Image (spheres, rainbow, N blue to C red):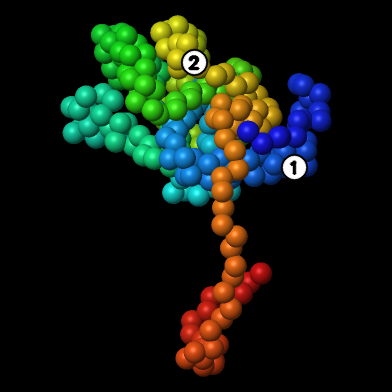
Amino acid sequence: MANQKQLSVTAGEKLKRKVYEEHLRNLQAELCTLQEWVKYKGLRIMVVFEGRDGAGKGGTIKAITERVSPRVFRVVALPAPSDREKTQMYMQRYAEHFPAAGEIVIFDRSWYNRAGVEYVMGFCTKQEHDRFLDLCPVIEKFIIESGIMLFKFWLEVSNEEQERRFRARRDDPLRQWKLSKMDLPARSRWYNYSRARDLMMDATDTEISPWNIVRSDDKRRARLNCISYLLSLVPYKQAPREQVTLPKRSTKGAYDDQATMKNRRFIPEKY
């Protein structure tokens, strides 16, 4: 892995925007290098993001993906299962999104829904929950032994910070869409979710497929720490790349192409 600059701030100190943006840019450049290496070597990588509602999963995933190709970094955020999908084997609808060679698939929530929201909200039976926890380590071992690199991240937010973020979502019209009908029960059932998390980690935090926990009360720091650690998990180098030479514009068939645009419908320029 290429050298990365270290954060020049005290641990626990609130991260300033300027510092955050500088380090984020460096890390995103490394993600671009990783991207080329994954394509060059035909690697298959899968990254699972889980955590409490309001923990910052979406912002972290956006920070990872905003400077890379969506054809390499694919984000999977599945909606509630359809009536047909409810009759399938539980892992079936997730498996079809697994990476092919040269792809990094990021799950914004995953099969671990069964260990979290489905279990707490009663969308699955206790027997289905218990069976999931029994089989999940076996399935993940099979996934990894098939050649897929699987990394699991849990974003942990405090009770106080989650409440603050939910209030901000409620009061800010630009963020109200983030306050889903599942968020309010997440507040009232805080300890139910805590117990579900503990059961999940007790069963699925294995040597071959461990949970990597990210403190996320400071969103900026969480994003940087998460990206930096993700990069450290994949041995990568600069992939060979041919020197690109931009061709000159051909004059064959030249005409006044801008004149033909004068009477087209341009949008009003208000800014």
Which quadrant would the C terminus be assigned to in this image?
Answer: bottom right
Residue 56 versus residue 243 in the image, above or below: above
Vertical order, 18 against 126 (above or below):
below
Percent x, y for residue 184? 47, 25
Indicate the amino acid at tag 1: Glu
List the residue tagged with mark 1.
22
Q: Quadrant of residue 146?
A: top left
- Per the image, label 2 sits on a secondary structure element best described as loop
27 displayed left or right of 119 = right
Q: Position of residue 83 (x, y in %)?
A: 20, 33
Q: Give 98 or 264, whichever is nearer the viewer.
A: 98
Q: Does residue 143 sit above or below 129 in this rendering? A: below
Q: Is residue 128 left or right of residue 201?
A: left
> Pointer 2: what residue?
210
- 190 left or right, relative to 76: right
Question: Depth-wise, is mark 2 or mark 1 nearer the camera?
Answer: 2
Quadrant position of residue 233: top right
The residue at the point 81 percent across, 28 percent down is: 9
> Which residue is rendered at x = 65% and y = 28% of the image?
225
Identify the mark at residue 128; answer none if there is no mark: none
Image quarter of the N terminus: top right
